[in-house]
Image (cartoon, helix red, strand yellow):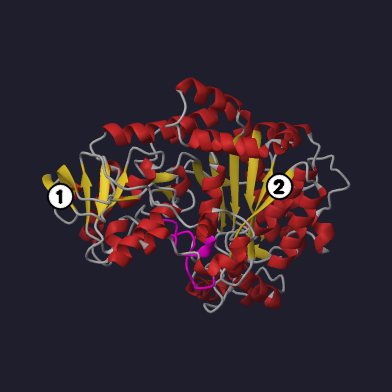
Amino acid sequence: MPFRRSLRLAAAALLAPVALAAQPPIGPALRDSLRDDRAFSFEARGPYRPAVPRPEALLGYRLGDRNTQYAEQERVLLAIAAAAPERVRVEEIGATHEGRRMRLFIVSSPENVARLDEIRRDLDRLADPRAGTAAELDALAARTPAVVWISESVHGNESPGFESGMQLLYQLAASDEPATAAALRNAIVVLNPSSNPDGHERFTVWYNSVARRDPANQSFEHDEPWSVQGRFNHYRFDLNRDVMASTQPEVQALMRGMLRWHPQVAVDQHGQVGTYFFPPAARPVNEHIGPEAEKWLTRIGRANAAAFDRYGWQYYVRSYFDLYYPGYWDTWPSLTGATGMTYESDGGGWKGLLWEREDGSMLSFRDGIAKHWVSAMATVEATASGARERVADYLAFRRRAVEEGRTGRVRRFAFASERDPLRAAELAAALLRAGIEVRRAEAAFQSARAHAYGQGTAAGGAAAARRFAAGTYVVDLAQPQGRLARAVLEEAPALDPEFARLQEQRFARHQRRGAAGALESYEFYDITAWSLPVAFGVDAWWTEDAPAVTGALLALPDAERRPGPALASAAAGAGKSEAKRS
């Protein structure tokens, strides 16, 4: 996730002679013996079924020896899936701007795969608790496997996840290890092997063309040109910042997949940091996620820690990477009821095949791949061991979202279409892509207590009666996606007051010290304010009441709603919706 700038490499090049003069050089044999993967094997969790091909047998090289291109990964994944149909199902969910197919690989025990369609229908029912009695839904939650979603390399030059996805699918499809089999009986793993195929391809082709396996920090292979920048997709969008507006086909495809499979755990595999990161997350945490999320962030974090401790690998938690902005691939699923998490690996990416740490030890691409693979397996196993509890907590989250919308102070959002019908329709389409229910009023309606945006509503401005015209878009919060709807639509997000106070204190200290004084880093990670109605420039209100509104719920066209092969040809028009045409 961090965006490295070439200035760092220039500084490293200038300082390198000083560092070499300050301490004796470490010989190549000793440096290589200090690699993190020295005691690691991808083949330790067998036995493996010989009919399922190993990734390295299909690629012709070991994972980590080079960066794998998209077509090579595609060939490996499809071959593994074809050799293990009793454990793996493949679903196509879309295509990139450059025409690369995006697929999900759904993996579970043969018993679960045999009734996968039935399980998915049960997940649909759990995701919308408004239908069915409490007893029926509780019984359903008790028998439904937990869904673990693993996403790889949303930033295309954060490459270890792209590689580890192949090994993860092989482990789940081929291993007869009792621990793997037990996990698959209680969990369904949805593997998204590449969130950004176009960006990854751009980075990989460049890197493979210059790679010399040179660990020197100032080496050319560690200085990705700005014109390449595989972090972004074809049109240079950051796909980990687009999840609220969902303007890009890759984001839209992944949202369709998540809304289809309703994951209870969602992992987004990133890089490159100095030391591996996994949750619990840093502050601030979006208030609409709710305090109950801490339980699973801690439980899964401890499982990852135990797995890393077995190898003596370093890691850190609760620092830098927060769960605040709803446009990330960890916060967004968290607002739908999942345990959303970012994992950041250290090896690979712009650090290349080999990278020399400050202590002289070697960090390899294979290290980064291995750590993502270990964390993914630990997450699957931790979730599977508490599957009933995790599914029950997901159901409880969705129930609370509906109840809060019925009884809370904020009941409804409304935005007008008169001033700019196109932008209002675009906003409605973005909400529909997120699974948020939107209605367009067929007749005028009245609210007794409405708050207009831009009039002090963030501080609880005065309410007033208002008549809304026909054509107004209405989002009632008494819906399963109500917490997500509120998070993306409210005029000003709430910020943890203690966290804000600490940042203000740091600012005050900076002011006292002046420009020459030592500066402290602020703890904000990235975006701190947002509001979709403000971003789209539409007139908007929130109301304390929710009187009945005449008008059916809007729906996206079939090409946007249904994963499948038709999406490959429809990708260019993926932004259209019935809301736009209305």
> Residue 507 at x, y = what percent?
25, 56
Q: Residue at x 69, y 34 (%)?
A: 183
Residue 104 in percent (x, y) is at: 64, 52
> Which residue appears farthest toward the top when viewing the image?
135
Q: Which of pointers 1 and 2 lies earlier in the amino acid sequence?
A: 2
| Kind of residue at disc 1 | Arg
Magenta highlight on residue 235: yes
Kindly identify which residue carries mark 1.
467
Query: Which residue is at 72% across, 31% downward?
Result: 182
Confirm whether residue 35 shows in the render: no
Front-most of 554 and 168? Answer: 554
Residue matched to label 2: 89
Q: Is residue 450 left or right of residue 422?
A: left
Residue 39 lies, in percent from the top left, at 76, 47
Q: Secondary structure at mark 1?
A: strand
- Residue 42 visible in the current orientation: yes
Q: Nearer the viewer, residue 276 or 57?
A: 57
Question: What secondary structure predominates along the stretch shown in magenta?
Answer: loop
Alpha carbon distance from label 1 to label 2: 51 Å
What residue span does the magenta drawing correspond to? 234-250
Q: Residue at x 39, y 40 (%)?
A: 289
Magenta run includes residue 6: no
Q: Callout 2: helix, strand or loop?
A: strand
Residue at 48% from the left image edge and 31% from the top image edge? 395
Q: Quadrant of the C terminus?
A: bottom left
Label 2 neighbour load within 10 Å: few <14, some 14-19, many 20+: some
